[in-house]
Amino acid sequence: MSLVPPFTRETAFKKVKAAQDLWNTRDPEKVAQAYTPTCIWRNRTSFLQGHAAIVAFLTAKWQRELDYRLRKELFAFTDDRIAVQFWYEYRDAEEGLGWKRCYGLEDWTFDEDGKMRKRMMSANDVEIDEGGRWFTDGMDVDEFPIGEEHW
């Protein structure tokens, strides 16, 4: 099945889960290949463009965000756009290795070959204790039941 526009509910869902799996590799070079060479990003307050900037950003991100575990869920889609709700947990290397959870939304736009040409992300982090983690070591991030009580 080809994961290129125009998206259906099934292909949009699979595109989101493929992105989740790719980001969970924590391999900046590999992740950057999912984007066009001139892809535009906004990640919180950072604005960047292109593979080199994406690789540099992700390298720094995963040096700070240790034990990173991400879950993405399809929020909405149209022909060449997908909106995603996501959560991830990590230990913050710059703040005493305490655990944090990030809650966020992304807006993606794709080219005709299925590469992302625009990624806009907004998110907030909250501190959590280790006992409050959802995505514990060894568990499939898709197995944790996230419902309204987690909003």
Image (cartoon, grey):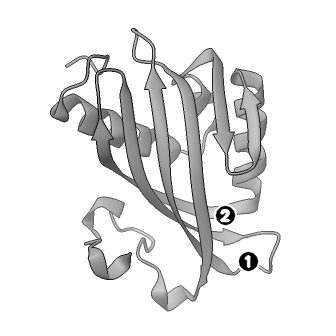
* Drawn side of residue 90 relative to residue 57, left or right: left
Identify the image quadrant of the N terminus: top left
Looking at this view, is 28 or 125 the one in front? 125
**Residue 138 sits in which quadrant?**
bottom left
Residue found at x 36% / y 21%: 80
Looking at this view, is 12 or 96 the one in front? 12
Residue found at x 82% / y 70%: 94
Residue 126: give its label.
none
Residue 66: give its label.
2
Residue found at x 68% / y 61%: 65
Q: Which residue, given by chain and number where applicable, does mark 1 sit on? A: 97
> Is residue 18 visible to the viewer in this orientation of the structure?
no
Whether the residues at callouts 1 and 2 have beta carbons within 8 Å, the answer is: yes
Measured as percent of width and height from the top left, residue 120 is found at 57, 39
Residue found at x 37% / y 35%: 82
| Picture layout, residue 52 above or below residue 151 | above
Identify the image quadrant of the C terminus: bottom left
